[in-house]
Amino acid sequence: MSFFRGALRAYRREFLLGLLCLVVTNGLMLVIPWLLKHGIEALQARAPLSLVGRHALAIAVVALLLAGIRTWSRLHVLGASRRIVADLRARVFTHLQTLPASFYARHRTGEIMSRAVNDLLLIRSLFGPGILNLINVSILYTAGLAMMAVLDPVLTLAAVLPYPFLLVAVSRVSRTIHHRSNAAQEQLAEISNKAQENLSGIHQVKAYAREDLEVEAFAGLSSEYRQRNLALARSRGLIVVLMTGLGGLSTIVVLWLGGRHVIAGTLSLGGLVAFTAYLAILTGPTIMMGWVLGVFQRGLGAIRRVEEILSQTSDLPGDLLAGPCPPLSGAISFRRLSFAYPGEGREVLHDIDLDVPAGSIAGIVGPVGSGKSTLVRLLGAVFPVGRGRLLLDGHDFNDLPTRGLREQVATVPQETFLFSRTIAENIALGRPEATRAEIEAAAQIAQLTRDLPSWPHGLDTRVGERGVTLSGGQRQRVAIARAVLMDPRILVLDDALSSVDADTEAAILAGLRRFMRGRTTLLISHRVATVAGADRLLVLDEGRVVETGSPSELLARDGPFARLSRAQQIERELEAM
Amino acid sequence: MSRAAAFGGKTRATTPPPDDDVVGRVYDARLVRRLLAFVRPEAALIALSVAFMFAVMGASLVQPWLLMRLIDEHIVPGRWQGVTALALLYLGAFVLELLARFGQLYTMERTGQNVIQALRVKVFARMQRLDMAFFDRNPVGRLMTRVTTDVESLADLFASGAVTLLGDVVKLVAIVAILAWLDARLALVTCTIVPVLFVLSILFRGRIRQAYRDVRRRIARINAFLQEAVSGMMLTQLFRREEQDRREFQAINDDHREAELRSVVYESSFSAVVELVGTLATAAILWYGGARVLSSALTFGTLVAFLEYTSRFFQPIRELSGFYAVLQAAMASLERLFDLLDTESSVIDGPRPGASGAVVVSASDRTRPGAGRIEFDRIGFRYLPEEPVLTDVSFMVEPGQTVALVGATGAGKTTVVKLLIRLYDPTSGAIRLDGIDLRDRPVHEVRRQCGLVMQDHFLIAGTVAENIAFGDLGLSRARIEAAARLVHADRFVRGLPKGFDEPLRERGGNLSVGQKQLLSLARAVASDPPILILDEATSNIDSETEALIQDALAQVMRGRTSLVIAHRLSTILAADRILVFHHGRIVEEGRHRELLARRGVYARLYELQFGARTAQPERPERFGEPLPVPSQP
């Protein structure tokens, strides 16, 4: 809970001021019944109206003061809670940016969002109304009981007599409420799951004519949810009864016993009225107490979960290295490299040994799941290199600082992710300072220029706005332009042309060839035509390199690559029929 | 691309308008009228609730009056006699208030739950009736919020809802009436705070709502940014954009904080100001009432009772102003729910009224399965206007025949199946089953005549037996076991700890792919349908199970009209006829040898598949799926 204490310390001025103000306001609040008492006593004594009026005036003044100070103190404490959460949110975000791919593989986006959204709200409640009311309740209790004791100690004792019993009962029922509320939430989740299962498989439901049965099953779940909610409502009703009963029972005791005291002359009538007023002040906090406890419990739980994220660190050795990365020429060597994704035992690359000379184009082919993407992903410094070594220009990969490395290696991943910004901004992702001319040149190489007329504002069209959607091919070309603009030494295209038609692909490859002169390119593709112009080909299967050589050598060899080439020839013929 | 997704996965990507935080009307008579239709069955419960409400009110309002009598008749004159009786009366009123309060809370919750439950099931049932095009348009997540969040927001309407609202109004009026009865002039002074409180509440609520809306808008922006940043985090890191993102996030985070701090101003002052007004009223009563007590126009107890009653003003006024937001949210949800209930399916249950040649199937006919003659007559189909999926497809399958559909991925084979079971209606042409247009038959009847084995095995949470019966409740245990035996599924089922009563985990997580396939087969034949529709699986299965499945298939197809999306060479060779699909048309038709001899599309497909076979001998034979390297989709 270091965060909890840290936050309190960072905003101690606000919290202390708030505390002080709360003491004052609660004091003032307790003064009002006192003034009322004196006013009524004055009335009873048939004092002149001016005296009564003076008490009334005093009440009005105190009320004004009270409103002013209370507003001011709440402003401070609630304001502090908002600031604490804003700080924490920024901190969580900054931290998320440092976490590696393995973290994002373990935690789904929804889960992270839930930490960053729901848990922060819980923490906000803890620091805002939670702390505010905790202080309030404590002060009111101590002071209120003291005032009552001054008025009439015996009566006070009698008034608080039902409290212990009721508190025990209330805490019992609270536990039941907690269980029942969980049970209801679980059932709602069941309903959700059922709806999810049904709606995702709706075509099957229809195909098998299962609609009525599904409705029946759903109605069953829904009816169970209703039952659980009603059970919850019964407990909730009970707690309202108990809470109100607490106040009411005390009032009756006070009236009955207090009435005797007034008649006996040990308590003034004004005192009795003031006493009931204090009692009324105490009922609120008692009800509040249960709520405050819940807020603290949930808030501290949320802090634990958020701190769990903040305690995660990167597993990439290069992330720990400071300083610049030496300029690379782009020679890549794998030395008996094996790799398994973090947290998974199964190796997806086995004993890879290969060299890609600086300035060459290497084409990589192989079936789905053969390890092509994994192989090139390692170059992006996303996962730690496993067994064996990966060398860039002879430097061990793990000795190169990640950030400097990423400056020189640009990856175009299989799945294109576009941010909801303009196309130009998406291209300039890695270099926000790039000039318009540079962006346009990159777009030119990626053959995006031919699409410009189809977008309402050309490169300044926002992706996703008013139904502007990009086709798969367009998205891939934006991603290519993005990588080109980085001006990298090593360019990795992971099946990045799969949705681009053949003519456009040829144009892009021609442009890239000029651009990549003297740089290293790794080109993964399913299409023989795409990799036909590579200097060297690697054929992967089940995590191993099964064939290497120049395209013409491989075609002559009648191995997997030659067979693939023939199959695609037939496909082309089929397509043309 | 997984072929499993192909069956249901041809979702046309359209960008749906987001479900915004609707700032809509607070009250819409049309929506409320429709909601009332759901509320009406609960009239008795509501009446009970109202009765409880009046009991609460009476019991709670009588208390200050008893207090007044206690003071005036006993405490001030110092007469002890009768105090205990009054205290007991007070206790009685109090206990009554508690019980009635419980009753009111519970009956109201019950009403709400009943209405919500009915609405939820009705919405869900409506969804089940909608056509596939509707599901192509609406993402699952959005539809789910209809039966969860939207329905739940109505719960608030009931819980903090209508009866409470009525109660609040009545309570306010009652308090004013009692005060007027006790002392008209003091009541007049006291009641001046009512309009003040109302105006203050409304004024503040308006401002607070505006401030909250600002906050919500900004938090929505933060969440959207965060969602995108987390989804694209790898890219951000690869392109070293962290610093830029951080600055942008900081900016919107600060913006949100400022909006929050503005809302805090109202949040902090509202309750304080309301309380201030209340206390000022107390002061006024003390002063003005005090003057009247001194001039003996007012008893002492009345003054105290006044003070008590005014303290009961605040709760109803506060609740009344809070009800506004609840109502607004509920209206937005209702609008969406009724929109959904109003959506009609484009696949209309037959027979079409007055359609020429419509044959009304009598009830007795309905239970008797037909012979199973399938006829596709010049079928055209498109999901989107500009993209024809099937063009001019005509074929006829005689009862008992086996027809194999072959073709490359996307050639239209699966669409043929979808049309046959009426997941969609054809854009042009007609499909006839035993001579009757599908559109003139009840949808369910058509689907029940077809035994279906698709690639994504849809298993429900239930026992093995339930998964085989799958909706046919009339199926005897003997039939279920016979079906399992026919497809050789009984062997592995009996090996399960509880046999046919073994519960399956979600989506059959405790079964192997081959076992799921055998179960699907068993399900398809359990109801003994005249037509069998089969999408042969392409997933790898161990050779033993594979042999079992092959044999099971032969058993199952015997005597049934079978339409097979074929991938196995053995199936193709055994078929009475092969239909070759290419770009949404049937381009060739015949038996294996004839087609090979024609050296057309079929011959190429065959060569593509089995010509490359030697390269990957360990992979099972698959037709129409290029290997070893998948081509572009």
Image: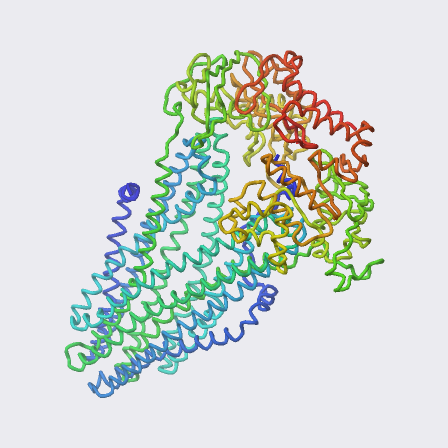
Image x and y of residue B394, in percent:
82, 43
Query: Which image quarter is the N terminus of chain A in?
Result: top left
Residue A345's x, y, as percent? 44, 30
Residue B203 percent across, percent down from the top left: 45, 60
Q: Is residue A50 visible?
A: no
A29, B581: nearer the viewer: B581
Residue A409 vertical placement versus A62 (above, below): above
Q: Quadrant of residue A536?
A: top right
Indicate the quadrant where residue B595 lies.
top right
Please name the residue shown 72% across and 45% down the image. B557
**Front in this rendered view, residue B607 or A53:** B607
- Asked if B486 appears above or below B126 in the picture, the reply is above
Residue farthest right in this picture: B356
In the picture, the quarter occupied by the C terminus of chain A is: top right
Q: Is residue B223 visible?
A: yes
Q: Is residue A551 above or below residue A57?
A: above
